[in-house]
Image (cartoon, grey):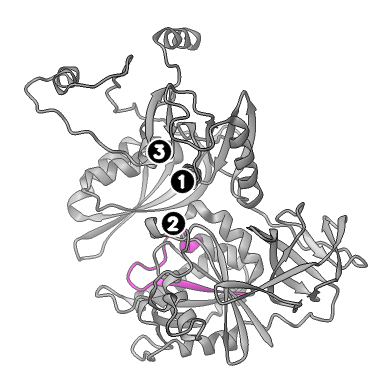
Amino acid sequence: MDIRNIAIIAHVDHGKTTLVDGILKQTHTFRDNQAEMQQTTILDSYDLEREKGITILAKNTSVVYKDVKINIIDTPGHADFGGEVERVLNMADAALLVVDAAEGPLPQTKFVLQKALQLGLKIIVVINKIDKKDARPAEVLQDTEELFLKLATDSGHLDFPIIYAVGREGRAGMKADQMADDLTPLFELILKEVPNATLEADKPLQMLISTLDWDKHLGKLAIGRIKRGGLKIGQRVALVAENEILSTFTIEKLLVSRGIIREATEEAMCGDIAAVAGKADVEIGQTITDPENPKSLPAILIEEPTMKITIGANTSPFAGRDGKFVTSRQLAERLDREKETNLGMKIADLGGGEYEVAGRGELHLAVLLETMRREGFEMQVSRPQVIMKNGQEPYDEVIIEIPDRYVGTVTTEMGRRQGQMKDMYTDGTGNTRITYVISQRNMIGVRNMLLTLTAGTAVFHTLFAGYKEISPVPDNPRPGVLIALDTGKTLAYSLENAQGDIKIALTPAVKLSLEQALDFIGDDELLEITPKTLRMRKRHLTKLERVKYKRNRN
């Protein structure tokens, strides 16, 4: 059987996961009576993905069309999860670049396309959502062509096929005004343009480990694309890194994708994406090879983190009331497991039961914290800080989409935070798109502030823009905090006086999300996270400790 390996890449919310839904359903991956036939975003099985409406973890599935197996790798579309994108693109030969027919290319479009071109992947452009009222497929195609011109390093990069789609309806066509009733044109284009992955079957085995997973029956799974040769049960293989043999072992369990499940197999052929079970000490980036020809495949290169937090065991007076895992040792074991699979994240032991966790942005870090919280962990977390490098700090390119009436509000706040406006575009329908370059330090907290100031209408897109000169940081507009020294009920009358103006009705309590709370706390404060509660607290709990801390700082 021939094999095609394709990745689905796009900016967040441009419809790639919905497009995969149609591909799965139209290739009869499920029976007509299976629940998946009524679902949407089938691959976003992770609770946080469904709640946030984004893909967080890269996943692979497979379909069969005209006796050709097509392995499909769905990738995240948010810049904070770029490590997932970089890691799994190694398993593909081509990529479907999905672009919204109204929004056009956005920052993450640029990021994922650049990575795909660097790896030499064949690109198929899918202009999606052409049924939208404000769709402008001709202009979006022109914008996409301009993006290719900016990123291309080879003339071959400019030769890419284009197809149009309505992902939610499962329809595609080679012209925007000539749409088929299904995705047949897309399937045919994939067979025509994507190279057959089985061409090096007669060469010595090479399989780069691109991801790790865990099965409660089989243990750790090492997953990757078989670049050369093939795998069989009982086969003796070598685990190598930098062309040095680390160990040898026998293949005892072998799995391949069939639809959205993995099934056991006796043999995995060249070009397929396989999971090898039973080898506990494997790591992402190592190569499984023929012991007689132990040559490594190129290592996976991941961009460095730009933001960090400190995590420690909860030390507040309320510690241990909610959590199942509350000790420093349990935290360390959990973070060690994360380090194995999350290549975009760096974790260091600071001693004293504290750990520094560095990631690609606030969302990257917040997803880890929320995941651990749901697993039953209690912890205390510091305010996010950016990672400086050679006297410089990280900057982002930020695109903010807002109704026209909020332009003044946004420009005032971004100007106060030293944001450099690069572009402003009004679409004529009452919406404005503004592009800024701004330091990540000055972006901390701005997302939630602008959402409040624009009645929740602001939409943000970010892309890492490199390290630049250290930018001034504006004064913190937060007026201060009230510290409770004793437990007990808080009376509305007392709080009203404490707020400073008895003529004004008591301000309702604001329930902050985990990300909002991380933005809100100061450098001398911590966020206490338990499975049931988020509490903001001072790092030093007593007045005497706080006074000593201030004196030492001065």
Residue position for label 3: 444
Q: Position of residue 1 (x, y in %)?
A: 69, 88
**Apparent side of residue 224 relative to residue 508 in the rendered image (left or right):** right
Magenta residues?
94-110
Q: Position of residue 144 (x, y in %)?
A: 44, 71
Residue position for label 2: 47
Badge 3: few (under 14), some or many (20 or more) residues near its Cα, within 10 Å?
Answer: many
Residue type beneath disc 3: Ile
Asked if labels 2 and 3 touch by Cβ distance under 8 angstroms, the answer is no
What is the spatial separation of the Cα atoms under label 3 and label 2, in whole angstroms? 26 Å
Q: Where 244 sits versus 124, above or below?
A: above
Q: Is residue 286 shown to the viewer in this render?
A: yes
**Apparent side of residue 548 relative to residue 419 in the rendered image (left or right):** right
Magenta region includes residue 411: no
Residue position for label 1: 374
What is the spatial separation of the Cα atoms under label 1 and label 2, in whole angstroms? 10 Å
| First in sequence: mark 3 vs mark 1 | 1
